[in-house]
Image (cartoon, rainbow, N blue to C red):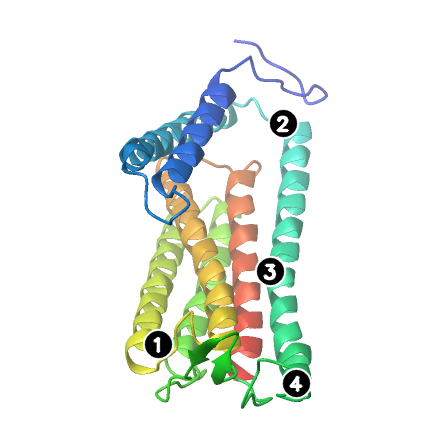
Amino acid sequence: MATHSENQYFVPHGSIYPSILSAGLLSMAAGFVFSVATDRGGKSLAYLEGPGRWMMYFGLAVVLFMMFKWLGSVVTESVTGKYKNWEDKSFRWGMVVFIASEVAFFAAFFGALFYMRVLSVPDLASYSPDITPYKDFLAVWPSQGPGGVVLGETFEPNPAFKPMHWMGLPLINTILLLTSGATITWAHWGLIKNNRKQLIVGMALTVALGIAFLICQGLEYHHAYTEMGLTLGSGAYGATFFMLTGFHGFHVTIGTLMLIVILLRCMKGHFTPEHHFGFEGVAWYWHFVDVVWLGLFIFVYML
């Protein structure tokens, strides 16, 4: 097996994994398109729907299997000492660029919230209802919509609608995420000190807090739909609320899965005080998720 020094960059051998993964992604995407295809009358195409669904499931299975195999190869290369200083720098810069792209992703959503709340809603209310479809529209936030006849259809705001208050589950979720940021930092300190018990306990606590956050988020959505009249159809407020909190919840789900993988690797004895970027990369991502939630808590729930 080839080795390299600190001044050489490790280049892995050729692999068919990218080709198989691409085929799986193509099958999954094509299967999804076939499964939702309709004719010009809007009726589903049965002869495409069934095969399309199986193509989608097959593609998903291929993608998951290839991710497991490919990431497994990366882990093997790491624990066998293939990655030195040059590779470590590459991974760090790659993670920096990835998190920067995530910042831009959420910045676009916060920008949409700002546009609707500060610019769009007040501007729509300033027009005369004689020249716009927005009858009985009020420049208030949270806004459910205009009411009355809109583009030829009657829209009646839900009288049971209530905005989500920051007290209760949102505050509990804030405490959970902030605490998880502290526990993963404590676990990192344990890794640096080569204290495996502190490392594993800290990671286990972080995973538990991440799962607790997702459970509370699910309870919050159920409460919003069943008792508050707050849905995706609740006008500008409902759309931005579920868009921002939903995508954040998706990122927390991905982050929790990453934390579970890192916890299992810690339990197997992976990572050393000198080389542990796999741990650090996930920790960076988790802290990013924490910071985004603080923005959500302030601008979506409190203000």
Answer yes or no: do the residues labelled 3 and 4 have beta carbons within 8 Å?
no
The quarter of the displayed image where residue 91 is located = top right
User: What secondary structure is marked by label 4?
Assistant: helix
Q: Nearer the viewer, mark 1 or mark 2?
A: 1
**Three-letter code for the amino acid on which mark 2 is drawn:** Lys
Residue 64 screen position, x and y as percent: 37, 33
**Three-letter code for the amino acid on which mark 1 is drawn:** Ala
Q: Is residue 179 visible?
A: yes
As measured in the structure, the alpha-carbon distance from the residue carrying label 1 to the one carrying label 2 is: 50 Å
Residue that mark 3 sits on: 106
As measured in the structure, the alpha-carbon distance from the residue carrying label 3 to the one carrying label 4 is: 24 Å
Residue that mark 1 sits on: 224
User: What secondary structure is marked by label 2?
Assistant: loop
Residue that mark 4 sits on: 122
In the image shown, does 133 or 292 lie closer to the viewer?
A: 133
User: What secondary structure is marked by label 1?
Assistant: helix
**Three-letter code for the amino acid on which mark 3 is drawn:** Phe
Q: Residue at coordinates 29% horizontally, 32% vertically from top-left?
A: 47
Residue 164 screen position, x and y as percent: 43, 81
The numbered mark, 1 or 2, whose residue comes first in the sequence reads: 2
The numbered mark, 2 or 3, whose residue comes first in the sequence reads: 2
Give the label on residue 84, or none: 2
User: What secondary structure is marked by label 3?
Assistant: helix
Answer yes or no: do the residues labelled 1 and 2 have beta carbons within 8 Å?
no
Q: Residue furthest right?
A: 7
